[in-house]
Amino acid sequence: GQQLNQSPQSMFIQEGEDVSMNCTSSSIFNTWLWYKQDPGEGPVLLIALYKAGELTSNGRLTAQFGITRKDSFLNISASIPSDVGIYFCAGQLKGGSEKLVFGKGMKLTVNP
Amino acid sequence: GAGVSQSPSNKVTEKGKDVELRCDPISGHTALYWYRQSLGQGLEFLIYFQGNSAPDKSGLPSDRFSAERTGGSVSTLTIQRTQQEDSAVYLCASSLGQINEQFFGPGTRLTVL
């Protein structure tokens, strides 16, 4: 099936540092979504991107829909301890159904 | 509440028993999805319902897995003759159909002994 390559798989950072993660694919996507999952909870939507080149911010989070429509990145600035969790990218394939394809996730640890 | 709800939150069962997991989507959402998440892994798509259309069952791992969505709202995922490898968190999500912002429930953690 279609795959999203999400990297890195994990990161350990100090509080206050910025962090960047990305997802790439060989396929073209119409939509990119970024989710965060806390332990024992379901994923929570952070940012949704619908247009190639779109750059969207949500507080300390910034995400971009790659111009080739095959990639997206998420940046978190000035990290805080509650940023800890697993971050997933997800995309809807061009010409596909409403199903989303998910990356394998990036586990973020923030040291106070 | 206004979000997606799932029940039970935890289920422990013995190998070979059947289990039913329930999902209540957000009111008005026409699309409903089931995913499976094994420990430390990403989300594995299982099945997708959209309105009155035939469900997309392409992700169901075996014929022991089935799902229904009654009245376009509540959905039940049934696993028959459970196996230990079925142990995982089962997540349900709903969305407004063509708008792909899926909203997830808290999941049901299934443990098969």
Image (spheres, rainbow, N blue to C red):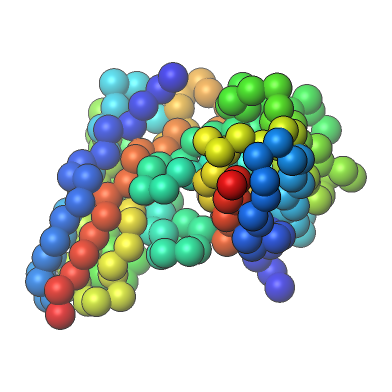
Image coords of residue A56 (percent x, y): 32, 56
Image coords of residue A8 (percent x, y): 18, 45
Q: Identify the image quadrant of residue B52.
A: top right
- B50 on left or right of A57: right
- At a point 29% along the width and 21% down the height, the residue shown is A26
- A30 on left or right of A110: right
Q: Going by the picture, which residue comes out furthest to the right?
A: B71
- At a point 33% along the width and 56% down the height, the residue shown is A86
In which quadrant is the C terminus of chain A drawn? bottom left
Can residue B45 be seen from the camera position used here?
yes
- At a point 22% along the width and 45% down the height, the residue shown is A9
Q: Is residue A25 above or below residue B113?
A: above
In which quadrant is the N terminus of chain A drawn? top left
Image coords of residue A24 (percent x, y): 26, 32
Q: Is residue B10 above or below residue B62?
A: below
Can residue B97 be seen from the camera position used here?
no
- At a point 45% along the width and 33% down the height, the residue shown is A101
Q: Is residue A79 above or below residue B56?
A: below
- B13 on left or right of A71: right
